[in-house]
Image: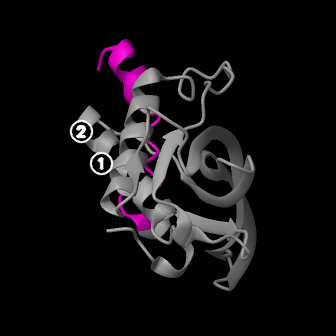
């Protein structure tokens, strides 16, 4: 696989082949009236460059933005570009190296024929991707909802599989937005 192609697809946000392996956490302001929201826009400005070519990838940025917009419009929200929306959306992406440390008992038979169990500790390095989607009230300029998805990154062999993985991750994160399940549509 050409290096440029591999770089473009390495960050797949494939928190596994299915959303079951994506850990999602949601927090929100229980005092906020989410039923008053009907329009959204992206918070102006871009995220600062991280220096990680996988996070700073404009192809991943476009996929995440499209997935967020598709999810919100499917829930009945309307994207605004001409005037102030009811809420702003912003996302953050990070990749972190993690260690998986575990111990297994290895069974051996000694030279007298006795079974011996010897603990063996193993260490594996992996990368965990985190996608944070924030919703901020446009009038108050306050964060009112945050969804966080975390999972192990896997390399995706095609751009189509990368897109599908991003779509699945965003859908899992936004599944319970707005709180209470009241969509606009």
Residue 57: x and y in percent read 49, 23
**Quick one: 47 or 144, which is closer to the camera?**
144
Q: Is residue 31 left or right of residue 145?
A: right
Indicate the quadrant where residue 12 lies: top left
9 is within the stretch colored magenta: yes
Magenta stretch? 1-19
Indicate the quadrant where residue 145 lies: bottom right
- The quadrant in which the N terminus is found is top left
Indicate the quadrant where residue 171 lies: bottom left
Dot 1: within a 10 Å radius of its alpha carbon, few (fewer than 14), some, or many (20 or more) residues?
some
**Quick one: 139 or 66, which is closer to the camera?**
139
Q: Residue at x 69, y 49 (%)?
A: 139
Residue 89: x and y in percent read 56, 45
Dot 2: within a 10 Å radius of its alpha carbon, few (fewer than 14), some, or many (20 or more) residues?
few
Residue 181: x and y in percent read 46, 78
72 is within the stretch colored magenta: no
- The quadrant in which the C terminus is found is bottom left
In the displayed structure, would residue 14 be above or below residue 5?
below
Is residue 56 in sight in this rendering? Answer: yes
Q: Is residue 181 left or right of residue 122?
A: left
Is residue 168 in sight in this rendering? Answer: no
Q: Is residue 72 left or right of residue 142?
A: left
Q: Residue at x 36, y 40 (%)?
A: 66
Q: Which residue is mark 2?
A: 160
User: Marks 2 and 1: CB-CB under 8 Å?
Assistant: yes
**Quick one: 128 or 82, which is closer to the camera?**
82
Q: Which residue is mark 1?
A: 164
């Amino acid at each position: 696989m050409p290096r440029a192609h591999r770089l473009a697809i390495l960050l797949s946000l494939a928190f596994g082949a299915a959303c079951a392996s994506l850990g999602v956490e949601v927090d929100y302001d229980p005092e906020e009236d989410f039923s008053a929201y009907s329009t959204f826009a992206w918070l102006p400005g871009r995220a600062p460059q991280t220096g990680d070519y996988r996070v700073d990838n404009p192809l991943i940025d476009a996929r995440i933005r499209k997935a967020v917009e598709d999810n919100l419009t499917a829930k009945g929200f309307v994207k605004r570009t001409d005037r102030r929306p009811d809420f702003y959306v912003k996302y953050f992406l990070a990749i972190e190296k993690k260690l998986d440390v575990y111990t297994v008992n290895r069974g051996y038979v000694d030279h007298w024929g006795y079974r011996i169990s010897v603990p063996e500790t193993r260490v594996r390095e992996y990368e965990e991707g985190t996608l944070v989607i924030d919703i901020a009230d446009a009038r108050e300029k306050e964060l009112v909802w945050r969804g966080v998805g975390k999972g192990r990154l896997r390399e995706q062999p095609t751009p189509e599989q990368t897109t599908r993985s991003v779509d699945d991750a965003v859908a899992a994160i936004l599944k319970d937005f707005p709180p209470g399940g009241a969509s606009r549509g």
